[in-house]
Image (spheres, rainbow, N blue to C red):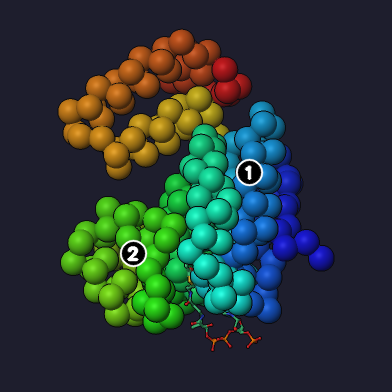
Amino acid sequence: MSELITTHPFNNDLRVALLKLNRPKVLNALTTDLLQEIVSELQRLEELPEVRCIIITGDDRAFAAGADIMKMAESTAMDQLNDKRLRLWKEFAMITKPIIAAVNGFALGGGHELSMACDFVIAGDTAKFGQPEINIGTTPGAGGTQRLTRAIGKSKAMMLALTGEMLTAREALACNLIAKVVPEVALLQETFEVAKKIADKSPIAAKLIKDSINKSQEMSLRDGIEYERRNFYLTFASADQKEGMNAFLEKRSPEYKGN
Ligand code: CAA
């Protein structure tokens, strides 16, 4: 059985695809091969015009409990340096379609970093989030100290990464690490409802919003506002912008074609 299961269309909706991590015996621990599969699948979906939103999930017990410790335990610094993971994470970040992490159970270490690399997180109410690398004598290595600090601030990020403690879903929501908490059993349905809302919108606008918000994490406010303005101007080259505004004026629902 494959370590990554794609369901597309998801819930009979061609616009939504679901990627499910499938290494349940090791709580979906991430190997380089699994990360490669995720990235390859995202790249394939990126090229399918009908796909407008992608959900990544795990199972009830774990979204992903981190990088695979079994594979890492005896590795050397040079093994790590030469591993293609860093390139894969960069390729992950180049996907322009919205990606939602639907998290039940543990999202720890590299698994938590995977959820943070997605555009936002919806969690079941029993989910747990953390960067426990310090418990095994190492540090986060795929954005854990950087994205986490930007998301929740230095003090809380320090406490989490230095103690290895986990946040509950409610705590993660309270500090803006995640976007929404839903009952554990309803996670995929609730996430699908959100994905559908995104899929109803202009894919061009969605792509540009994702780009502008991601830039806000890397740019000064002044440069970010300039950047955002150019993306705003760009929408006026799209048929979707004309459709959206005309539909509003004609008091009908817009039909976006993504051009
Ligand atoms: N890698 C490999 N195997 C893992 C794993 C991981 N990250 N996490 C869990 N497993 C395996 C366990 O070894 C166990 O396997 P066996 O049944 O063969 O013994 C199985 O999954 C179930 O795990 P537990 O029995 O430990 O389940 P639990 O409910 O008692 O505990 C847990 C759950 C608290 C998540 C615990 O498994 C745990 O602490 N896991 C490790 C979490 C961690 O340290 N993650 C960070 C990894 S380093 C990293 O990610 C680096 C990076 O960012 C680049």
Marks 2/1: CA distance? Answer: 26 Å
- Of the residues tagged 2 and 1, which is closer to the observer? 1
Q: Is residue 259 above or below residue 35?
A: above
Where residue 174 appears, as percent x and y from the top left, is 28, 65
Q: Position of residue 9 (x, y in %)?
A: 73, 45
Towards the viewer: 6 or 79:
79
- 19 is higher (above) or lower (below) than 58: above
Amino acid carrying mark 2 in the image = Leu
Q: Is residue 54 left or right of residue 176?
A: right
- Which quarter of the image is occupied by the N terminus? bottom right
Q: Is residue 170 left or right of residue 26?
A: left
- To which quarter of the image does residue 46 belong? top right
Q: Is mark 1 within 8 Å of ligand 1?
A: no
Q: Quadrant of the C terminus?
A: top right
> Judging from the image, what secondary structure is the residue with disc 2 in?
helix
Residue in the image at 33% along x and 35% along y: 215
* Residue located 67% across and 45% down the image: 40
**Other-residue count near label 1 (Cα within 10 Å), few / some / many at <14 / 14–19 / ≥20:** many
Q: Position of residue 163 (x, y in %)?
A: 29, 80
**Residue at x-position 55% and y-position 76%:** 73
Instruction: Looking at the picture, tell me which residue is in the foreground, 6 or 181.
Output: 6
Give the residue pinned by disc 2.
173
- Secondary structure of the residue carrying tag 1 is helix
Image x and y of residue 131, in percent: 39, 70
> Sequence-wise, which precedes: disc 2 or disc 1?
1
**Circle 1 sits on which residue?**
42
Q: Nearer the viewer, residue 219 or 96?
A: 219
Q: Is residue 123 visible?
A: no
